[in-house]
Amino acid sequence: MKENVNTPIYSITPFTLLDYAHKAACILWFAGCNMRCLYCYNPEIVMGKGTISFEKALTFLHSRKNLLDAVVFSGGECLLHKNSIQLITEVKKMGFLIKIDTNGSRPEVLQQLLENQLIDYIALDFKAMPVHFEKITQSNLFLPFEKSLRLLVESGLPFEVRTTVHSDLIDTNHMKAMIQYLEQHNYQGNYYIQHFVNGATTLEKLGYSVKELEKENLSTARIKVHFRG
């Protein structure tokens, strides 16, 4: 994927109470992604080009100091961009809390951010187990994801794991295997299952998804499963 260094941000959501728990935040949506998830809701962001420069984003954020608590970096994949660490550093200096939404494909960037204490919270997308990962994401990036998961578990930083589920792609047995995998990698905490929203515009045309997983008791002693959507 060719990144646009000068205008990496596709758009800005100026205010949200939904994306960072108990915080008033804005969202910076970064253009481009190194995965092509079949169910992706943001094809215009993943396939599109940025329109907003770092400078314009910083000017906007200066105007929101003392009005917002946090800035969410999302996309696309926000950590793909060469200057993302620099931007996060500048935003952190302004006093904002930083949340990162990531597919886990850039563990080396995550490691730098963790070492420099630049992140307050992370939402890590767990797409699928290796046997289904390439089909769902159209990528071979499971091993970088696994490294990111290990980094986060070892760091002690607050983070959540989340998975979007389409019933044609991930069934109950797949989900149980994913929960077992997380336990084996010493994750404990909340695991958010996001049901595919039928009728949404996605990267690939998919059939109707049924909500079968809620019939199952998927939570364990260490992992609490929550359903969204």
Image (cartoon, rainbow, N blue to C red):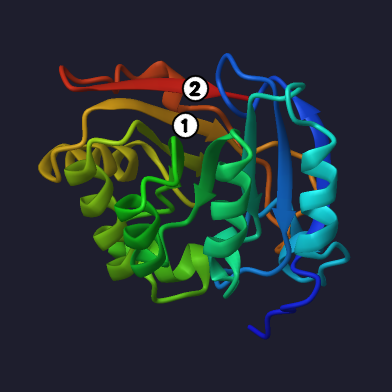
Q: Quadrant of residue 82?
A: bottom right
In the rendered view, tell whether residue 51 sits above or below residue 200.
Answer: below
12 relative to 39 in the view: left or right: right
Image quadrant in which the N terminus is located:
bottom right
The three-letter code of the residue at mark 1 reads Ile
For image coordinates 77% across by 51% down, the residue present is 58
Q: Quadrant of residue 98?
A: top right
The residue pinned by badge 1 equals: 193
Q: Residue furthest front?
A: 93
- Evaluate whether residue 166 shows in this view: no
209 or 102, which is in the foreground?
Answer: 102
How dense is the environment of label 2, judged by Cα within 10 Å: few (below 14), some, or many (20 and up)? few
In the rendered view, tell whether residue 115 sits above or below residue 81.
Answer: above
Q: Which mark is residue 128?
A: none
Q: Position of residue 134 (x, y in %)?
A: 42, 71
Element type where label 1 sits in the image:
strand
167 relative to 203 in the view: left or right: left
How dense is the environment of label 1, judged by Cα within 10 Å: few (below 14), some, or many (20 and up)? many
Image quadrant in which the C terminus is located:
top right
104 or 167, which is in the foreground?
Answer: 104
220 or 147, which is in the foreground?
Answer: 147
Asked if the residue at tag 1 contacts the one at tag 2, i.e. Cβ–Cβ closer than 8 Å, the answer is: yes
Q: How many marks?
A: 2
Q: Position of residue 224 (x, y in %)?
A: 30, 19
For image coordinates 58% across by 26% down, the residue present is 20
Q: Position of residue 131 (x, y in %)?
A: 30, 65
Element type where label 2 sits in the image:
strand
The three-letter code of the residue at mark 2 reads Phe
The residue pinned by badge 2 equals: 227
- Evaluate whether residue 2 shows in this view: yes
